[in-house]
Amino acid sequence: MNIVKEIDKVVDLALQEDCAYNDVTSKNLSLETKTASAVLIVKSDGIICGIDVFKYVLLKLDKNFKFKVFFKDGDKVKKGDIILTLKGPAAPLLAGERTALNFIQKLSGISTTTNQFVQIVKGSKAGIYDTRKTLPGFRNISKYAVRCGGGQNHRMNLSDMVLIKDNHLTLIDDLAKKVKDIRKKHKKLRILVECEHEQHVKNAIAAGVDIIMLDNMKQPLLGRMVKLIRNSSTKTYKPLIEISGGINFETIKNYAKLGIERISIGMITHSAPSLDISLEVEVHK
């Protein structure tokens, strides 16, 4: 994926939202003829993400910026590391710095939070997956940040996987028949069923779905359902098991010990704290 092309519209909207092309402060301080230099510094340990996006924001405002970059997306960074230095016209730099920082801070926060979960389950079979709980318009770059943190992407959108949730199940009388009908129409799509209790799991197994999601189950029931699925598996049918709901840094290790393949966590995109990154700017007289 070319991340710059993916975020072009988002960057345009962000710059318009901030009226970056009409920075009345810079205009009234007569900065149009001045140049500036800046250093992008990390203030806490993490996984950096969004370097090209940061550059792209400023280059949209003025093509004369020059950068010297010392890291790449997905790299581990420590407090005090210099990500990049830059030189260019002062007015567009000061007009675009907040927007550029917003992107790199948020994306790095997603990568960092994702990687924290990845490190906790390291050595287990479990992969860390995101969800569709993303800020509208921000999905592609949010999921890019998840990958930079070592996580994996769940559905990108509603069209690339059949995910039968609890609300859907109330509309289905015969899950096995419905799954069979769906497979005739969408041969290449995987089918996932969200299960909240034992009968859901039994129905999903009988239907032969590809992935069984155990959603918001308490530990005792969760363990029993994992055993049920494994004991029902055969040489030709072994569904993947996904766990979702109530996942945090304290609980995830116990979930990973169950030997499941997938753990999906909405908070890595919707609640990840931004990484502390600052831009130290010097305007030259």
Image (tube, rainbow, N blue to C red):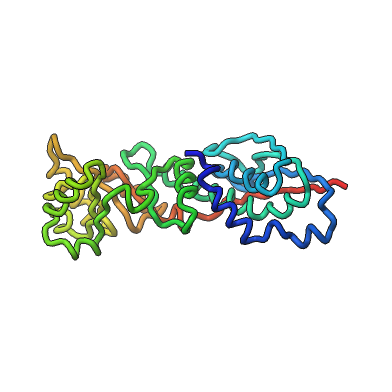
Q: How many marks?
A: 0
| Residue at 84% across, 49% down | 33
In the foreground, 63 or 265: 63
| Residue at 56% across, 48% down | 8
Asked if residue 275 is positioned above or below residue 171 in the image, the reply reads: above
Left or right: where 264 falls relative to 46: left
In the foreground, 272 or 73: 73
Which residue of the protein is positioned furthest toward the front in this rendering?
185
Q: Position of residue 182 (x, y in %)?
A: 19, 50
Which residue of the protein is positioned furthest toward the right in this rendering?
285
Q: Can residue 254 be spotted in the picture?
A: no
Q: Position of residue 278 (x, y in %)?
A: 67, 50
| Residue at 83% across, 61% down | 28
| Residue at 42% across, 46% down | 117
> Which image quadrant for residue 68?
top right
In the foreground, 228 or 10: 10
Q: Can residue 67 be spotted in the picture?
A: yes
Left or right: where 234 falls relative to 6: left
> Which image quadrant for residue 84?
top right
In the foreground, 237 or 173: 173
Q: Position of residue 4 (x, y in %)?
A: 55, 42
Q: Position of residue 95 (x, y in %)?
A: 71, 55
Left or right: where 32 falls relative to 265: right
